[in-house]
Image (spheres, grey):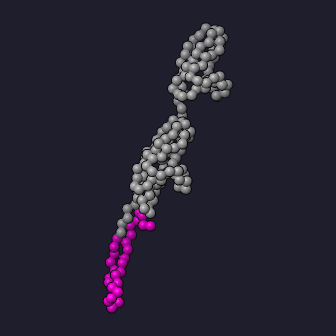
């Protein structure tokens, strides 16, 4: 395997039908260009989404889940991640014949979900209720506490009970 190296070799030619005379040695330089590492970009996704990562390179691109390149997870010019909830780094190499490039890390940045927008009548008379409407997401759960406890309901709309004091919902 001579991938990515330049070396000088000396060859001696022997003529078998002559009187055992050998030719002079002459240098012959062979230059082997290293295979380039694949190129890609670092995508960003929203928490809970998949990322479709595209790469380009020479030969076959192989995808790995660890920097030791021992856990192969795919081959080809693209890889679709599972649903991610934390930043995750993948590694890819290019292979052409016996030559394998150095690895290229690609980090998928996972952005947190944005807080939904809530609309509704926030000024009501004592003893009345109001309906709050959430938007900007797909699934909504309404809570009585900021730490996500005290589930009150689910869905984009939540109708409060009759209120006699200022109340905050999450």
The picture places residue 106, in percent across and down from the top left corner, at 48, 47
Q: Is residue 138 above or below residue 34?
A: above
Magenta span main SS: loop
Query: In the rendered view of the protein, which quadrant contains the N terminus?
Result: bottom left
The picture places residue 29, in percent across and down from the top left corner, at 34, 71
Q: For residue 20, which quarter of the picture?
A: bottom left
Q: For residue 86, which quarter of the picture?
A: top right
Magenta stretch encompasses residue 114: no
Q: Is residue 95 above or below residue 169?
A: below
The picture places residue 149, in percent across and down from the top left corner, at 66, 27
Query: In the rendered view of the protein, which quadrant contains the C terminus?
Result: top right
- At 65% from the left and 12% from the top, the residue drawn is 162
Q: In the visual, does 3 lie left or right of 144? A: left
Q: Residue furthest bottom?
A: 19
Q: Which residue lies furthest to the right in this view?
A: 150
Please state the extent of the stretch shown in magenta in the rendering: 1-29
- At 57% from the left and 28% from the top, the residue drawn is 139
Instruction: Answer whether residue 10 is visible to the viewer in this image.
Output: yes
- At 36% from the left and 69% from the top, the residue drawn is 30
Q: Is residue 141 above or below residue 131?
A: below
The picture places residue 140, in percent across and down from the top left corner, at 58, 26
Q: In the visual, does 29 lie left or right of 95? A: left
Q: In the visual, does 114 lie left or right of 98? A: right
Number of numbered markers: 0
Magenta stretch encompasses residue 20: yes
Q: In the visual, does 30 lie left or right of 109? A: left
Instruction: Answer whether residue 22 is visible to the viewer in this image.
Output: no
């Amino acid at each position: 395997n001579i991938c990515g190296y330049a070396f000088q070799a000396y060859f001696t030619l022997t003529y078998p039908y002559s009187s055992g005379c050998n030719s002079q040695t002459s240098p012959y330089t062979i230059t082997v260009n290293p295979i380039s590492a694949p190129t890609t970009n670092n995508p960003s996704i929203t928490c809970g989404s998949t990322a479709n990562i595209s790469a380009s390179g020479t030969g076959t691109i192989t995808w790995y889940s660890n920097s030791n390149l021992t856990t192969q997870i795919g081959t080809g010019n693209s890889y679709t991640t599972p649903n991610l909830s934390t930043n995750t780094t993948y590694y890819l190499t290019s292979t052409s014949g016996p030559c394998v490039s150095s690895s290229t890390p690609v980090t998928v940045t996972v952005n947190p979900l944005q807080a939904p927008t809530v609309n509704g009548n926030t000024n009501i008379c004592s003893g009345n209720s109001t309906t709050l409407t959430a938007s900007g997401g797909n699934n909504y759960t309404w809570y009585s506490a900021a730490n996500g406890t005290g589930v009150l309901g689910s869905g984009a709309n939540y109708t409060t009970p009759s209120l006699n004091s200022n109340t905050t919902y999450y």
